Image (spheres, helix red, strand yellow):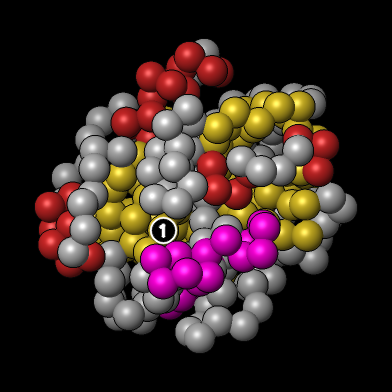
Amino acid sequence: MNAFGAVVIALAWISVESFEQRLIGGQKAKISDFPFYASIRIYPNRYACGAAIIDRFWVMTAAQCVYSVHPSSLVVVAGTSSLNETGDRYGVHSVHVHPLFNAAMKTNDTALLRLTRSVVYSKNVSSIALATDSLPGGKTLELCGHGATQYPFTNMSVPLMSVELKSITNAQCSAALNRPITKYNLCTKGKTTKGACVGDVGGPLTKRGGVFGTTKLYGTVSWGYPCSQGMPDVYSSVLAARPWIRTISGL
């Protein structure tokens, strides 16, 4: 995945500090391996952003994807690894944007969507646990999404793609990007040919729990520089947003 940003409102990521929404250097993914993945569509079926199912009634994504969109215009699609498949479709009852979200700076870039009906779980659809611990540098993480797969980007990826990335410390991230990285963010860095890109915004950054562990959601794609150019990708931290998430959803 390379540079990424929201495809929703005139490709919100087409700035230098936006991710050209795509997942670069990844491989095709089975939805059964990422059953918590969902995509945000603008009614009836225009792809906008990635998201994560965190409960039967709640989905998490990037605030930049939905802050200016009426709930009735949004559709959440789960249970499919292809943008061409119908999947399980859910209407959105309400949109909750983090109160400290800054659209210009992409800070506190977190939003929760309450669905109009309960998600039906299956082998291809389930929720993901929220991170309860901080993430040190050097950990192996996974990112999945429908973002562009090459740079300069062209179209979104029809099949779901995934890529492994390594976490880096916020200090390392800040030094590489030459700008402040706060506790509300976390960063990853892949090889020059791997990273997030246009279309990956809002998508889930996860850490596998192993045979007996629990896979957890650590971040959602927020912003970055041009895809796969060796620069870090920046995410909204789930851990930092936990108090607000609990207040809104009870999770």
Residue lying at the far front of the rendered structure? 104
When asked about the image quadrant of residue 182, the answer is top left
Q: Residue furthest right?
A: 44
> Which quarter of the picture shows residue 164?
bottom left
Tell me the amino acid under the disc marked 1: Trp
> How many marks on residues?
1
Residue labelled with disc 1: 223
Question: Circle 1 sits in a helix, a strand or a loop, which is it?
Answer: strand
Is 19 colored magenta in this rendering? yes
Specify start and end residues of the magenta stretch as a single range: 7-27
Question: Of residues 126 and 181, which is closer to you in this image?
Answer: 181
Q: Any magenta on residue 197?
A: no
Residue 144 coordinates in the image, percent (x, y): 50, 58
Judge the density around disc 1: few (<14), some (14-19), many (≥20) Cα neighbours within 10 Å.
Answer: many
Q: Position of residue 191 (x, y in %)?
A: 28, 76
Residue drawn at the location 38% of the way across and 24% of the way down = 242
**Placement of 150 over or under 73, stated as above or below:** below
Q: Position of residue 50 (x, y in %)?
A: 59, 52
Please name whichever residue, 103 or 32, is drawn nearer the observer in this view of the structure. 103
Name the residue located 44 percent from the left edge and 42 percent from the top edge: 102
Q: Residue at x 54, y 42 (%)?
A: 63
Task: Please tell me which residue is depicted at 69% across the width and 37% down the height of the picture.
Answer: 122
